[in-house]
Each structure stands twice: as structure tokens, then as C-alpha cells.
Image (cartoon, rainbow, N blue to C red):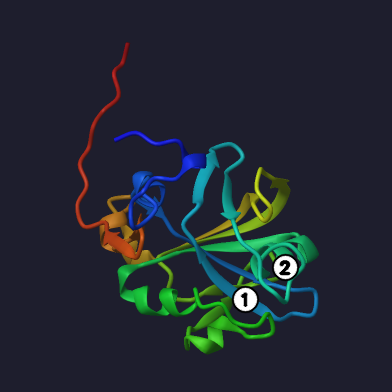
Amino acid sequence: MFYRPENGHGLPHNPFNAIVAPRPIGWVSTQNAQGQSNLAPYSFFNAVAYVPPQVMFASTSAKPDQTDTKDSVANVRETGVFCINMVSSKMQNEMNATSAAVARDVDEFDLADIAREKCQVIDCFRVAQAPAALECKLTQIVKIQGDNNFVVFGQVVGVHLKDDCIVDGKFDVTRAEMLARLGYQDYTTVTSAFTLARPTT
């Protein structure tokens, strides 16, 4: 099968959503200038650089109570900081609950009964039970093609790791039981890993 996206695919569901998979989920916690917290999952998320460490997440729609985007991007615009919380399969229901389209004055930590802790470097909360969390300072927000498509880039200025996820000096994603997005309404859990050394020449 071949199709041009502008002409449609003819399938019951958009296959593009499932082709680039699995995708890590960035559970983005932010707060606005008044200190109101927000927590939302984004599967258009990844690390983009080692030195200095940098990450990105993309928001692709808007809410009626925001001007041109969703609460996470609006809050980052106001404060210049955000935290990426990695999602364990043990918290899949809580993560899913925070994906609901609710009013901007709703605190998703409270909505999904999620324990929070203050970040160390930035003024924001993080998910207390996340296997890892990345405190980030905004470097740039890039408007890309499409009415409400924004990519948020941040430099990682603080890293939290659950002690029981560190095995033999490495962060163990299988111990963390990381959740990943497959597309549509499908997810997977990282339960196994293998080592593949790069060529030396």
C-alpha cells in the first residue's frame, strides 16, 4: 500500500499514528505564573542531545480555554520551565487519567490522585513515584507547520532516578517497567533488553 497523506489513507484509523513506534511518553508537569499545576502525557517526546542534555516534546492541538495551544505549552511560555516524568506501567491508569481534556484550572495531580514532590532546581512539581524525572529549563519553542503544532525544547538541569532502578551502575529501563506508546490506543511495556556493541572501525 502507498498513499499521499494529503489524499487520505482510506483505512479506518490513521496508520501514521502507529508507524513511529514505540515512542517514549513524556509526562510533562508544569505550572502557570500563578502556581497552578498541570500534568499531561505527550508521546511526541524524546531526548535530542547529550551535552548539554536536552529534550523535546511536541503539542499538536489546542483547547477552547487557551489561545492556540494546550495548557503545558501555555505554562512553559509563562514560566520557562517544565519537568519530564517518565511513566512506569504501574502508573498507566494515572497517566491515562491525566490525558483527559479538562479546564486549565484543573490540577491533574489532584484529579488522578498522584503524589507530587517539589523539583530541586526549577519551580515546579514532579511525579513522586516516577522512575525518573528530568527538570528542564526552556531553550526554545518552535512553531512548525500546522495550526497548533509547537515543539518545546529544554535543557535538563536536574535528574531524579529511583534508587531501585539503578542496577550495576546503570539505569535499568526493564526494572523501571517503562511504558511506551504504540499508536491508536495501544501501549507496551519495556520488559526485556539486549546489548549490541557498535563497530569499532
x, y percent for residue 195: 22, 37
Q: Residue furthest top?
A: 201
Asked where in the image residue 77 lies, by quadrant, the reply is bottom right
x, y percent for residue 154: 65, 50
Q: Using a 10 Å C-alpha cutoff, classify the residue at mark 1 as few (fewer than 14 neighbours), some (14 to 19) or many (20 or more).
A: many
Q: Which mark is residue 48?
A: none
| Residue 58 is at least partly visible in this image | yes
Asked where in the image residue 107 lies, by quadrant, the reply is bottom right
- Residue wearing tag 2: 75
In-image side of 83 versus 21 (left or right): right
x, y percent for residue 96: 42, 75
Task: Classify the position of the C terminus by image quarter.
Answer: top left
Q: Is residue 41 above or below residue 117?
A: above
For label 1, the SS is strand
Asked where in the image residue 185 lies, by quadrant, the reply is bottom left
Q: Is residue 2 above or below residue 183?
A: above
Question: Exactly how many numbered labels are in the figure?
Answer: 2
Q: Amino acid at mark 2?
A: Asn
Front-most of residues 13 and 192: 13
Q: Amino acid at mark 1?
A: Asn
Q: Earlier in the sequence, mark 1 or mark 2?
A: 1
Q: How far is mark 1 from mark 2, CA to CA?
A: 8 Å
Question: What residue appears at the point 74 percent right and 80 percent down from the top-left corner?
Answer: 35
- Residue wearing tag 1: 38
Front-most of residues 89 and 5: 5
Question: What residue appears at the point 54 percent right and 38 percent down from the top-left corner?
Answer: 50
User: Mark 1 touching mark 2, by CB under 8 A?
Assistant: yes
In-image side of 199 versus 71 (left or right): left
Front-most of residues 79 and 162: 79
Question: What residue appears at the point 69 percent right and 84 percent down from the top-left corner?
Answer: 105
In-image side of 126 versus 80 (left or right): left
